[in-house]
Image: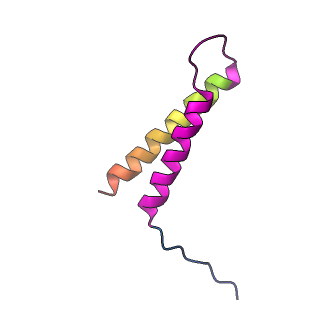
Amino acid sequence: MITQIRSSTSWSDTLKARKKHLTELMKIVDIKMGKTSNVQTLTVNLIKNEMSFIEDQLNGRK
């Protein structure tokens, strides 16, 4: 029988860590100047959407 390992971190802590990770990724791929590619634009938009989704989940838990 396989049992799942349960972590002591809460779901809110997991979401906060995920949001922090995405924030750091945004610093790397953020479009500041120069020519941007379609992939870069899509990546930034997807990261922003994911961060918004995480915010909604965190606000719903309060």
Image x and y of residue 10, in percent: 44, 66
Display coloring:
rainbow
Question: Residue at 51% of width from left, 39% of height from top?
Answer: 23
Up-down: is 23 above or below 6? above
Image: magenta residue range:
10-39
Q: Nearer the viewer, residue 31 or 54?
A: 31
The main secondary structure of the magenta stretch is helix
Image x and y of residue 24, in percent: 55, 39
Q: Nearer the viewer, residue 16 or 38?
A: 16
Residue 41 within the segment the image draws in magenta: no
Q: Where, by quadrant of the figure, is residue 41 drawn? A: top right
Residue 14 within the segment the image draws in magenta: yes
Image x and y of residue 11, in percent: 45, 63
On the picture, is 61 further left or further right than 36? left
Question: Residue at 50% of width from left, 53% of height from top?
Answer: 17
Question: Residue at 55% of width from left, 42% of height from top?
Answer: 22
Location of the N terminus (image quadrant): bottom right
